[in-house]
Amino acid sequence: MLLNEKDIKESDKNMNENEFVEADASEGWQERLTGMFPALEQELHLTEHALSVLVNPGKDNRISSYAVCVYEPDLVEDKRNGSRNTVLARIREGILKSNPDIVAVDSRNSGLKEFEEAVEDINGRFSVRMDKNSENFVKCLENCIRYGIENYVPKAAAFACCARYKECSEKKQCIHPNTLYAKACEYRKNLENGRVFY
């Protein structure tokens, strides 16, 4: 897939492997995956539009990889800041000249473990090759999302508790609506271990 001139200018032409721009969801797997996002965001208690598919423009104006990301907003509504995106899975294209539909899915979490073909490197990262038109491919990305949210390490600095601490104490669980931000709450960790302070 080629990027158009507008996309190239907007992405500053020289992006590195950790810089991404919004994908246009033109491929079938993207449409299937992004169609699942609203239900996943609701089920996993994420804010609306927390999940996205981003693209990394590579050499020769060709896409080098995609990333399935989750966005962690601050408590205060802010503009979408790319530094708050966490990559849950990376999809690399062009790994086989003989079959352009075969992609590699890489993830730092073990959401790929259930796939027989998955391999783990010495840094604990997992990778699997799949046909991007298969149902297994989208299932694989869904696994990466679920596992990544369950084991999420927040970008926000740790804080003692928020204004909801009394309600949390009464319910003996964190009730903050922003799941990702709430994972930085120290009181939440106490509640999960059965320690109620208030």
Image (cartoon, rainbow, N blue to C red):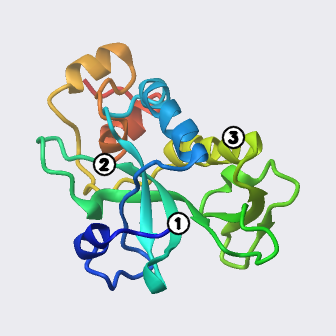
Asked whether the beta carbons under mark 1 and mark 2 sit within 8 Å of each other, the answer is no
Q: Is residue 60 left or right of residue 169?
A: right
| In the image, residue 97 above or below residue 24 | below
Which amino acid, mark 1?
A: Met
Pointer 1: residues within 10 angstroms few (<14), some, or many (20+)? few
x%, y% of residue 48?
31, 32
Q: In the picture, residue 126 is in which quadrant? A: bottom right
Q: CA distance from mark 2 to mark 3?
A: 23 Å
For mark 1, what is the residue? 1
x%, y% of residue 128?
76, 62
Q: CA distance from mark 1 to mark 2?
A: 29 Å
Q: Tell me which residue sits at (55%, 49%) in the image.
A: 27
For mark 2, what is the residue? 72
Which amino acid, mark 3?
A: Lys
In this orientation, which residue lies closer to the viewer: 80 or 63?
63
| In the image, residue 102 above or below residue 72 | below
**What's the mark number on residue 130?**
none
> Do we see residue 94 in this rendering?
yes
Q: CA distance from mark 1 to mark 3?
A: 23 Å
x%, y% of residue 139?
69, 40
| In the image, residue 194 above or below residue 148 | above
Q: Judge depth for marks 1 and 2 and give the one in front.
A: 1
Q: Is residue 86 left or right of residue 167?
A: right
Q: Tell me which residue sits at (21%, 58%) in the image.
A: 81
**What's the mark number on residue 139?**
3
In this orientation, which residue lies closer to the viewer: 106 or 45?
106
Tell me which label, 1 or 3, sits earlier in the chain. Answer: 1
In this orientation, which residue lies closer to the viewer: 25 or 107?
25
Q: Is residue 111 left or right of residue 193?
A: right
Label 2: state its secondary structure: loop
Q: Tell me which residue sits at (25%, 23%) in the image.
A: 198
Tell me which label, 1 or 2, sits earlier in the chain. Answer: 1
